Every structure is written in structure tokens, then in C-alpha cells.
Amino acid sequence: MQGLIMDYPLTLQHLLERSRKLYGRKEIVSWMPTGLHRYTYAGFYQRVGRLASVLKRLGVQKGDRVGTLAWNHYRHLELYFAVTCSGAVLHTVNIRLFPEQIAYIINHAGDRILCFDESLTPLLEGIRGELKTVQHYIALGEETTPPATSLHPVHSYEALLAGASPHYDWPHLDEHDAAGMCYTSGTTGHPKGVVYSHRAIFLHSLAETGVDSIGLSEQDTIMIVVPMFHANAWCLPFTATLAGSKQVFPGTHMQPRELAHLIQSERVTVTAGVPTLWIGLQQVLEQESYDLSSLHTILSGGSAVPRSLIETYERRWNIRIIQGWGMTEMTPLGTLSRLKSYMESWPEEERFAVRAKQGTMVAGVELKAVDEEGRDIPWDGKSQGELLVRGPWIASAYYRDPHSAERFHQGWLRTGDVVTIDPEGYIQIVDRTKDLIKSGGEWISSVDLENAIMAHPKVLEAAVIAVPHPKWQERPLACVVPRPEYRGEITGEEILAFLRDKFARWWLPDEVVFLTEIPKTGVGKFDKKVLRQQYERHIRPGSER
Ligand code: ADP
């Protein structure tokens, strides 16, 4: 039809140019091994231009993959934009995977250039012989001489930038061009690659600025703790650049005290990361005094956020925890749990109950849940089904993977998460299909039990897993980490007594074991796979339902 709206490409170049034109004075702060590094978006833009010139000189062409093995800092942010805006593909490698998995994904993605933090040199040296496609290694350190290493050829990032022009003619890109890729952690089989288009990241970032979504704004100072090597750090580095927020990166300084210090000194207003981080921070805040009055919002997700955590932060420090749910396959945001206007006047108990759910779909995302026959389940808050999603930032296949079809079905992504959806549209994750406990033909939600146990005042962390049982197939086992002051002073019976009036008798764990720490995955989630292996033979035949 004539007179139609322009076909304007939704590429990341728009975000970069916008930040240059509008936010040249705003700061980007990183905690580096040498101390705090600060510069402005104006300085950032210059260096992004230099980096793009470097990539061109090294022969990087449109669509080529540039891998990064790095923590959260300004050099990584420069890579986020220079690689994508010059037409190459940013492949963020999860540094916490096993070395053989890291070698597998670098080869599978076909990375031509690999940029790495110097602290990770030994890791790369260990797999150097297996890497088939890498033509250049770039060390992301302060020095202008390359580090002494067996990696070859190796360059110093700073030396390359110093010798390159800041003026770079950004090429014309199509919004459907690939911008980034990331691999899922691959709980079964090999990790699977997800490729993000410019359009997907653009729309996702725009959605994160919406006031009923994250609402990130120019007024905010965001501390990005969620790793830049996992699911685009929830796209927050892109969104913050689009919005012109001050960005704060902790580098390797991820200890609760260091985070508290950074929030206080940089006057952080928003931060984001997995729940285990905020459980750790809570402990520090209870014992020591920091001025966190600037912080209004913590975004948390990646695994279920305990309701008790949301309550504690709100009541004690007036900090709002907003729970989000998403997946690597979804760029990654799917839902956020915010109250609707008329819920604000509900009794406190009900308000917390809503906020402890994973939330409603972010504008742009569509979702539904289906039963085992593939029929839609009603949105009644009770029926359970597997969650299916679709939308402009949701993957339609895995990168070069013959088994893709199992997860992508008639235009929907099968998430592998079992949920209920209430009449208000709030989803609640009952479990990941593989974490559900099947006892005597019925399901027990490990997430519900964990949530309840973590509300016990003597408990710091809890993970509930299925252990094999001769009669009931599987039974729940609770792995509990007491708060340090209660170590050795809390009994399994105390935990079970606490659960008795909250669950049916057959849901109660057969046993409670006390640990000093729950094993965590590379991105800080409870690693139930490791626990399951540990307790595989932990059968108590006498146990009753
Ligand atoms: P990984 O497989 O490494 O955990 P992802 O980060 O892609 O990789 O994990 C996505 C999964 O994490 C989801 O399918 C879901 O099971 C879980 N998840 C994410 N956010 C939440 C949340 N708020 N509550 C419960 N589970 C969550």
C-alpha cells in the first residue's frame, strides 16, 4: 500500500549512535584489577570505533564470529557494540563451563577471533590444541604488550586500539542479520547455540525500557552483576546504552561486600542478578552497615526467587525485588512480576504472594501452557502444563543442531518448565520438567518446598531433589544450608515441623541433610544435577508417604 511507514532497520547501530548523540557526558564505571576505571559514553564511542577498525584490519568479515571469554567490564561492553555494529557476531562464551565444553562451543560456533581476560589465560592454554578455527587471540588487559602465553598469535587489546583509527564507517546492516550468539549450559548432551538477530536485541532492549517492564531510564545507575557471558547479561548492557543510564560493572568483584561497597559508592539505583547473590548480600547487610538508600530495585531471576527474600528486602531496607523469568533461547526476558494497579491495595500477604510468582508476559511475548496431549490448560492458577512461548526475540531453532525440532513446535518454543497460570495471567513455575519429583505417580514441586524451607529463620539456602525409591519411584530429599550462626544447632525435625501445616503429608521430604553450601552452576543457580549424583544411592526403603 502506498504512503506506508518507513522500513527502518532495527539494528544496534541505532543504540550506539543514540548514546553518542545524547549521553556523551554519562559515565561507565568498571572495577578492574587495577582499581575503578571511569570514562564517558563519548570516550566509549571513540574506542568502539577503534575496535571496529581493528576487527576490520584483522580480516573479520560480516557474519564472522568473535568470541569473548570475559567478566563484566568496559572492554567487554566495547566488544558488545563494536562486533555487532560492524556486522560480525558476538559469541559470549560462558567461562564457567567445563574446558571441554568451552572447546566444543568455540569450534561449533567457528570463532575466528577470541578475546579473553588475562586471568583466564590458563583456561585457554589448556584447550589451545583443540581449537580449530581461532586465528587471533586478543588479551583484554591493561598492558600494551601481549602477555607471555603459548596462545598464538596473541595481541594486546590496548595496543591494537592505540594503533587504530577511531573513525569507522558503520556498514549498512539488515535487522535480520545475526548480532550475537550464546550457548545454553547443556544439562543433557552438548550445549546448544542460540543466535540473536539485531532486531531481536533491539526490540528486547526497547521492551526493557517500558515502565511496566523494567523501566530502565536515563535517571538510573545500573550495576550489571548478571554475567555478560550468559544470555547477554539479560540485555541490560544494550538497554542501558539505549537509555543512557550510568553503567557500573563489578569485574571479578562479585562478593557481597564488594557489591555493597559499589552500590554505596556509585549510588546505584538498579541492579540485577540471580537470587543466590542477594541471599549473600542479605547476610552482609544484616551484620554491617552500608548506605544503600540509592538502590530502589533489584531484578532477580534465572531460578525461583524465594518469597522470604522479597519480603525481607522490602521490609528491612525498602528495596523492591522484581522477579523475572526467561531463558537463553529468549534473549532472555519472558515475564516479570509486578503488581497491577488494583493489587496495590490488596492485603500485604496477597501482594507478596503475587510478587513471588514469575509474573506476566512482557509486551511482545506470547505464552500458553499445554498438557501432555498438547491441549491448552485453563488459566485457573491450578492446572499445570508445559510453558510454550513465542515472540520477536525468541529463537526458532538451535544453531546447526539436528535435534532442534524437539524443542520448537509449530512456531512455539517448548520451555521445559512446568507452570500454572492464574486468571490474572501470572505464571508460576512449578518446576523444570527434569527437577519435578515423581512420587507414586504424582508430582511434587521442588520449587515450592525450597521456597517454604528458605522462609525458616535459621535457613540460608535449600534445594530439594528427587532420590530414587523402590516403592514410590522417587521421594524428595531436602538439602539445607543453615545460617552460619545456627550451624549444628538446627535439626531435620525442626524443618519438617515447619513444613507440616503447609503441605500434604506425602509432599514432606523423607530426610533433611545439612550442607555447608549448595553446589552452584556456572551462573550461580543451585546445581541439582550435582546433588542428584551425590545422593543417587541415598535410599531409605523404610520411608513412608
Ligand atoms: P541454564 O540451563 O543454564 O539454567 P537458562 O539461563 O537459559 O540456562 O535457564 C533458563 C531456565 O531457568 C528456565 O527454563 C527456568 O527453568 C529457569 N528460570 C529462569 N528464571 C526463573 C525464575 N524466576 N524462577 C524459576 N525458574 C527460573
Image: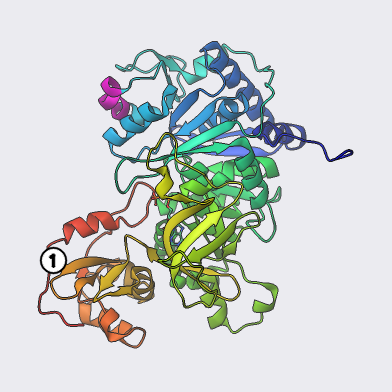
Q: Residue furthest right?
A: 3
Three-letter residue code for mark 1: His
Q: In this view, does 356 lie to the left or right of 508?
A: right
| Residue 87 found in image quarter | top right
Q: Residue furthest bottom?
A: 501
According to the picture, the residue beneath numbered tag 1 turns out to be: 538
Q: Please tell me which residue lies in front, 527 or 249.
A: 527
Magenta segment's dominant SS is helix
In the image, residue 377 sits, relative to residue 518, either above or below, namely below
In the image, residue 34 sits, relative to residue 150, either above or below, namely below
Q: Please tell me which residue lies in front, 444 or 296.
A: 444
Q: Which residue is drawn at 22% across and 63% down?
A: 515
Q: Where's the C terminus, which quadrant? A: bottom left
Per the image, is 127 magenta? yes
Q: In this view, does 232 lie to the left or right of 469?
A: right
Give the percent coordinates (x, y) of residue 32.
Answer: 47, 35
Per the image, is 39 magenta? no
SS at circle 1: loop
Describe the colour scheme in one phrase.
rainbow
Q: Residue at x 27, y 70 (%)?
A: 438
Give the percent coordinates (x, y) of residue 212.
Answer: 67, 61
Q: Please tell me which residue lies in front, 532 or 284.
A: 532
Q: What stretch is highlighted in magenta?
A: 122-130
Q: Does the residue labelled 1 lie within 8 Å of ligand 1?
A: no
Give the percent coordinates (x, y) of residue 268.
Answer: 59, 52
